[in-house]
Image (spheres, helix red, strand yellow):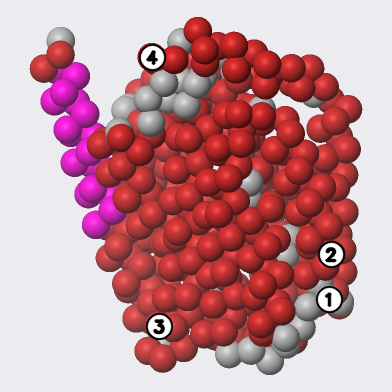
Amino acid sequence: MVVPFMTIYATQRLGFSITQAGLIMALFGAGSIVGAFIGGKISDKLGFQNVQLFALFGGGAMFIVVGYLTSFTSLGIGVFILSAINESFRPANSSAIAYYSKPDNRTRSYSLNRLAINLGWAFGGTLGGFLAAHNYHLLFWVDGLTNIGAGILLLIVLPMARTLKQQLIKQKKDNIHRVTSAYSDAAYRWFIVLTVLFAFCFFQMFTILPLYYRTVLQISEEQIGILMAINGLIIAFTEMVLVYKLEKSATAFKNITYGVWLIGISFGIFNLLNGQFWLAFISTVVISVGEMLSMPFMNSYWISRSNDYNRGDYAALYTMAWGTAQIASPSLGGYIADHYGFNLLWWIICSIAIFTGLGYYRLMAGKKQVAEAVA
């Protein structure tokens, strides 16, 4: 709820420049890298349950604290700490999904998790837009309390996962030779590089694009919230069916490639078409389809290369890739928009997406050649 309105809050309410707002979001990305690394390491040692609980309760408290920080320095520090705590949830949550799912339904399991996320995003975006239009301070309180509420729910619903730590320690001792590092997986490293580039483009949607909507297209906060809700609802109601169909008809990387290209197109159309809310609506639909084609299969790829003993490391590296993009996306995007205009930024994003899609395609081709050689 807070993140998509943070740049608007920083510029419209606190009086920061676009560049300063971008730097605030970059610090959010830096915190997410730290949180992902620590969360992944601790998940493999202490169990995903403890890490998720720490992230939800600690992150909830920090959201409330950040709402009271108004200077550039204090807000930057607060956002960094918030992100480091809150984003440690992601690798732990990814490990949890893998633990509770089976290999034959794992992609759909991640899609089901994304369905829940996007329903929350749809509701949160709508409510966030309403709150932002009336009182930005309420955004932080509501976001914080929902994090804490999720932590309480996790304690009630999944108490059995507390025994995972002992199970993993015993399994690791019995199967120590099966443990390999995600950092030594060459193909996975290339995948991570491409993911950073993809995420750099994608994160414009949550950082710079809302500011573009407000300042250039003259779309209100309520309408921006509606657009965020539309993105979440499209994904929630169609992704599970789409993934189920595509699992049987195409390779994962082919879907990723097409999805990345569509996300590039969703930004490029701002330079090709005129309009306000309906132009933003078209872009939202295109980026939603691109998101559905790419992200579930990215998850299934990294999980397929990991096992029960190194999954936290693989999840952490994947999350860190997104965190790296969270640094570069708002800081570079904000600088380009501030000094050279939004039009140049959208062309750059579109070009990077096309290049990244080709990279995924070549990685797919290389994987296919290896498989054929082994066969």
Whether pointer 1 and pointer 2 mark residues with C-beta atoms closer than 8 Å, the reply is yes
Q: Secondary structure at mark 2?
A: helix
Does label 4 or label 1 sit earlier along the sequence? Answer: 1
The residue labelled by disc 2 is 64
Query: Which is nearer the eye, 322 or 39?
Result: 39
Say what secondary structure mark 1 lies in.
Answer: loop
- The alpha-carbon separation of the residues under discs 4 and 2 comes to 45 Å
What is the crowding at mark 3: few (fewer than 14 residues within 10 Å), some, or many (at least 20)?
some
Please tell me whether mark 3 or mark 4 is closer to you in this view.
Answer: 4
Which residue is the site of mark 4?
A: 177
Quarter of the image where one finds residue 277 = bottom right
Q: Quadrant of residue 156?
A: top right
Residue at 45% x, 35% y is 314
Would residue 276 be counted in the magenta stretch?
no
**What's the residue type where badge 4 is placed?**
His
- The residues bearing labels 3 and 4 have C-alpha atoms spaced at a distance of 48 Å
Residue with the mark numbered 1: 68
Please provide the residue range marked out in magenta.
355-372
